[in-house]
Each structure stands twice: as C-alpha cells, then as structure tokens.
Amino acid sequence: MSLPKLQWAQVVEEAGGPVIYKQIPVPTPGPDEVLVNIKYTGVCHTDLHARKGDWPLPVKMPLVGGHEGAGVVVAKGQLVNNVNIGDHAGVKWLNGSCLSCEFCRTSDESLCPDASLSGYTVDGTFQQFCIAKAAHVSILPKDVPLDAVAPVLCAGITVYKGLKESGIQPGQTLAIVGAGGGLGSLAQQYAKAMGLRVIAIDGGEEKKELCQQLGAESYVDFTKSKDLVKDVQAATPDGLGPHAALLLAVAEIPFQQAAAYVRPRGVVVAIGLPAGAFLKAPVFSTVVRMIQIRGSYVGNRQDGIEAIDFLRRGLIKAPFKTVDLSELPKVYELMEQGKIAGRYVLKVPEPDLA
Ligand code: NAD
Ligand code: ZN
C-alpha cells in the first residue's frame, strides 16, 4: 500500500488563533512508532484549552489537536513488534512516555516528566494520519466500533480512572459535576455499570434529559439552585451528602463547593481543568469531617484496556453526534457556549490509498 504525500488536517497556527482546514505532509513513523489512519476522533474540551493556549503548560505551535483518535495502523517502525499493520488502534492523550522513570515503572505513566501529549506537545488526531508510540497506542478489538470507542480513549479512560481513585464502593452515592458533558456522560455510564447511585449536576433542560436517560437518580441544575450544597445533600438517600464527587466542569465554582457537600470521609476528585482556577475548602470542616481532596489525570495503559472492555461488553453506552472533520470550528463554538450534551465525534475523510 502506498501512502499519499499530503493529507487533510485541522491546524492551529498560533495560540488563541482559529483552526485552519488545510493539507499538510503525511508524517513518517520513527523506529518505535506507528502511523495510524484515523477514521474517527472525539473532540475533548482539552482540545479547546490547547487551541486557546489557556493552561500553564507550553503547547506546540503550529498544532494539529485531538487525542481521541480511532483508526487503522498503516505503517510502523522497525523496532515495533507489539502492533501489526491492519490492527485497529486508539491514539490517546498520552502519546508516549520514557517507560524507564519511577512513574513509568510503577504504571503511573501520565506522571512521566518526559511524556508526550497528543494534540498538545506532538501533533494529534485531527488529521488523516497520526503518529503514536507503539508502546502506548491502544490495540482495539475489531468488534468495537471505531466511532463509539473514540470518546472512550480520553473521556472514558479519564473518568474510569477517576472512579477508581475516588475509592467509592458499589451502592454508594456519587456526585458527577458537569454530568451532561463529554466526560460526565461517560462517567454516568461507568458509575452505573459499577453499581453506584448518581447525582448529576449540570445546567439546563437538555442536559437534564440526557442525565435522566443515562440513569442518574437525580439532577441538580447549577443555573437554578439557590443553595447547591443543600440541594446536593438533599438528593442523597439519607441526606448526608454523596460519598464522592467527580469534578468535571470547566468552571471554578464547583471546585470550591464540593468539599462542603460530600459526607464525612467523602472524597473529592478534581479532573476538570478550568484555566487559572483554584481549589478551596475550609480547613476546620475538612479536618473534623476527614475529607479527602485529590487530583486524577487520565489513566495508564491497563486502565485503557479495561475502560475499552466496558464498551466492548456493552456495559456503557454514551451518546455522541458525528460531523465531518471540516466542522471542528462549529464544535468548538458550541463547546465554548456549554451547549454540547455528550460528545462530538469527527468523521475523518478517507484518504486515497493506492
Ligand atoms: P465539556 O465541555 O463536554 O463538559 C463540561 C460540562 O460542565 C458541560 O456540560 C457544562 O455545562 C458543565 N458545567 C459548566 N459549569 C458548571 C457548573 N458550575 N456546575 C456543573 N456543571 C458545569 O468538557 P469535557 O470534554 O467533558 O472536559 C471537561 C474538563 O475535563 C476540561 O477542562 C478538560 O480539559 C478536562 N479533562 C481532564 C482530564 C484529566 O485527565 N484530568 C482528561 C480529559 C479532560
Ligand atoms: Zn481529553
């Protein structure tokens, strides 16, 4: 099979600038890398942070964003023996890591100081052909649909890991903040599959309907609630507040509310990354109620395999809308306005392969 020299991609030329749909060269994989012909790619709010350049982490420019890419391996380097041409593969946020530091050795690869990040420090999945380190690429079972698996590759893995980090047990109550968004809708599905009771927190009727469809027991609308802490506690079966909260919203306020509504010994897991925001909790009640506050950042390779297997076994089903790669600017516009219920998945045009 001969690969084309040029491919279609969405490129950000400068931080804060627009995405430009244009043709760029098809990259060549290095000795430990694979080249994946991306068929579908999810759009994560992280991609919008990268386009805006609003995080305290330098972003590559010009940049091809995207890190929820599902496709087919079309080329590989000479050292690659764990991936074959023709395999279905997922390109994730963690594009590669050193594999030899303490964090990589103890399966905390996302903490590797030399990690490379798809669609952030290296070009990502908003293109027809994307490079990924063979050690980190997810091999996808062929019975898993490439469109439905795309959002699992970041949103799914991230919330699956966050649930593990929360230490929550089956039968306990979980507050999901930003429940109607991309991460939130998948978090609801994983929580349900794990036997948790879900309080969904988000804004507006469309998100309310989605959360109810996804199996949330109650919905607290942050745009309407006069006392969010009280309303969340009242939504738990015994009124004591949830056992844990997953913070997925791209706003600072929830990061300053959650410690107050979780029950004693409750765990607050910060996952969303609103720019310039701070976590805040009163010292006295955090101490005497034995509250834990922790961060959770994507997942390791095994978390990826497990999160994808939930999809393969039919345990999670999160809604997504599919549009063409060329429509990325419209998706960003809707995302900025908080108008996306669930996830958008981009269909990448088929390349001319001779
Ligand atoms: P999204 O835009 O799809 O969803 C965010 C949701 O939060 C929306 O539904 C919005 O209505 C809701 N929201 C806004 N303000 C709220 C409030 N005050 N209370 C409750 N809900 C509120 O975004 P996403 O793709 O799900 O990403 C969410 C965040 O997670 C982003 O900041 C992203 O960068 C981050 N993220 C972190 C990791 C990680 O590893 N920690 C991984 C992926 C994404
Ligand atoms: Zn993401």
Image (cartoon, grey):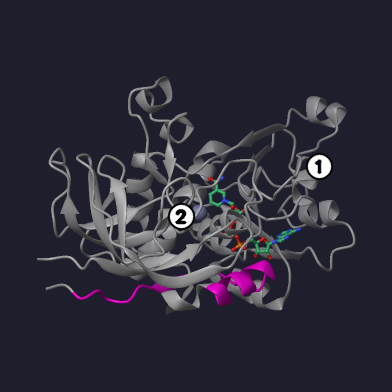
Element class at badge 2: helix
In this view, the residue in front, 291 or 138, is 138
Amino acid carrying mark 2 in the image: Gly
In the image, residue 71 above or below residue 289: below
Q: Does residue 313 appear in the picture of this structure?
A: no
Q: Is mark 1 within 8 Å of ligand 1?
A: no
Can you identify the residue that label 2 sits on? 156
Q: Which residues are magenta?
A: 329-352
322 horizontally vs 168: left or right: left
In the image, residue 216 above or below residue 240: below
Q: Quadrant of residue 200?
A: bottom right
Real-space Cα separation, disc 2 to disc 1, in angstroms: 27 Å
Q: Which mark is residue 311?
A: none
Instruction: Tell me the residue at 56%/48% (across/down).
Output: 171
In the image, residue 85 above or below residue 291: below
Crowd class of label 1 (few under 14; some 14 to 19; many from 20; radius 10 Å): many
Amino acid carrying mark 1 in the image: Ala
290 horizontally vs 320: left or right: right
Magenta stretch contains residue 350: yes
Crowd class of label 2 (few under 14; some 14 to 19; many from 20; radius 10 Å): many
Q: Residue furthest top?
A: 102
Element class at badge 1: helix
**First of labels 2, 1 by sequence position:** 2
Location of the C terminus by quadrant is: bottom left
Q: Which mark is residue 260?
A: 1
